Image (spheres, grey):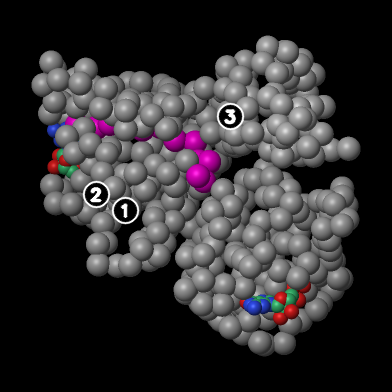
Amino acid sequence: MLPTVALIGRRNVGKSTLFNRLIRKQKALTHDRPGVTRDRLYAEVPHGEPPFALVDTGGLVLDESDGVEADVFEQAREAMEGAQLILFVVDGRQGVSTIDEQLAAFLRQTDKPVRLVINKVDGAELEDTLSAEFYALGFPLSAVSAAHGYGTLTLQEEIEETLQGLGAVPVEEGEQEDDITLRLALLGRPNVGKSSLINALVGEKRLVVSPEAGTTTDIVDVLFEKKGKRYIFLDSAGVRRRSKIDDSLERFSVLRALRNSKRAQVTVLCLDALQGVVGQDKKLLSFLDREKIPFIVAVNKVDLVPSDRLGQLKKYFENELRFLSHVPRIYTSAVSKAGLGGLLPLTEKLWSECTTRIGTGQLNRGLEDMIGRHQPPVVKHRRAKFYYLTQTGTTPPTFVFFVNDKNLVKPSYARYLEKQLRKRFQLRMTPIQLYFRTSR
Ligand code: GDP
Ligand code: GDP
């Protein structure tokens, strides 16, 4: 059985065009395979490395006027069940539609890797005009033109890399993934001390550490046990500074590094206490934030800071990270082992917040109280009226507020609601996602 890649998306975004492009115009086989519904297109891509099968969810008919109905999700769910990777296709010219948003919320609930494919980007120059909404959907993304072939080779490489990555997680014989307490990714510029931190945590020389930037030679997944719990650190290739490369390519290399974070449950972003927060760090921080990846910040090498300067150092980092007030920070040293004892418990706490589910009853009692305390402001003689609050997903916790008119909810009020949710339901460190939906 070949690994399967499913194309999901609303009508007319170009799924079948992309399908034909990826199978390189070789005639699509529409077979009746067991488990493949007749109205879906199925083709094998034998030249892939590894070879894979592509499924176009042709039956997934979505129309803006239909709204998203239960059976539509049912079809998406069915397509997803058999797939190892989901390509979520959207139209780069139209921006993010309501249905795209709803599908995104739905897809966020799966453990399977999802890649956002922005189609109809008919040339490199159009990539820069892509709206930020696409990034906000929270998936790693590729921009392509299925009709003209722009970006499709890269997309194919990304598909293959993801599939290879899935097969390559070295789970030793007899070991179940379930035994693993937490899958972690360590992210950061070269030389901030990622490999040293792993060594210090694992307690033996598992990685080759070299004083030259970017020389972690042996990139491996590291499996280790601490206090009866099992952790795995996934590959942590540094994000290299690539000053000569233009911006879009650089952005792309950052996306590559972030793929690891998507596979992990929690990411540790490592910063250098002496160097502070530099441009490349800021980029990583805002990507992690935008992609809603649960992460903590480890400010490493604190042993190099004189103890009477520590207060000042913390103040500096707090200020630099103030726009990420929910992200937990920890001050560490791979040399003196300062802070290391707290690192794993912190990642676990974060993950448990990130997977929290809150009952609807509890949420709505909370909602009533939040609104009672602080009424939404009047906007053009009208006031937002909230009907209902529900959690639609986890990782990150995702909430939908049903309201008489979502345009009446101003950003400042949305921020108030977010703060309240975090406070009332112990969601202090995790990314969360709020949606406002107009209803009746
Ligand atoms: P699907 O049914 O949602 O999979 O979409 P189709 O593959 O049928 O494509 C819908 C429309 O979008 C067709 O008119 C295509 O020619 C057009 N289309 C598909 N890909 C591209 C693209 O990359 N660029 C442009 N400009 N149009 C595209
Ligand atoms: P990576 O590229 O992020 O994996 O960084 P390395 O782990 O290879 O570390 C780069 C350099 O920083 C090496 O010379 C390490 O010995 C040094 N280093 C790493 N962590 C610390 C630390 O906490 N304190 C001090 N003083 N040096 C460190």
Return the x and y of residue 208 as percentages of the image width and height.
21, 48
Residue under pointer 1? 239
User: Which quadrant of the structure image shows residue 230?
Assistant: top left
In which of the image's four quarters is ligand 2 placed?
A: top left
Residue 181 in view of the camera = yes
User: Which quadrant of the structure image shows residue 373?
Assistant: top right
Q: Residue 67 carries which label?
A: none
Distance from mark 2 CB to nearest ligand 2 atom below 8 Å = yes
Q: Residue 412 carries which label?
A: 3
Task: State the quadrant of the C terminus.
Answer: top right
Task: Assess whether mark 1 and mark 2 are in contact (beta carbons under 8 angstroms).
Answer: yes
Would residue 295 be counted in the magenta stretch? yes
Q: Please indicate whether residue 423 sits to the left or right of residue 406 in the image.
A: left
The residue lying furthest to the bottom in this view is: 26
Q: Distance between the residues labelled 1 and 3?
A: 35 Å
User: Which quadrant of the structure image shows residue 195?
Assistant: top left
Task: State the quadrant of the N terminus.
Answer: bottom right
Q: Please indicate whether residue 46 sits to the left or right of residue 170 in the image.
A: right
Residue under pointer 2? 190
Q: Earlier in the sequence, mark 1 or mark 3?
A: 1
Would residue 8 be counted in the magenta stretch? no
- Magenta stretch, residue numbers: 290-301
Q: Badge 2: few (under 14), some or many (20 or more) residues near its Cα, within 10 Å?
A: many
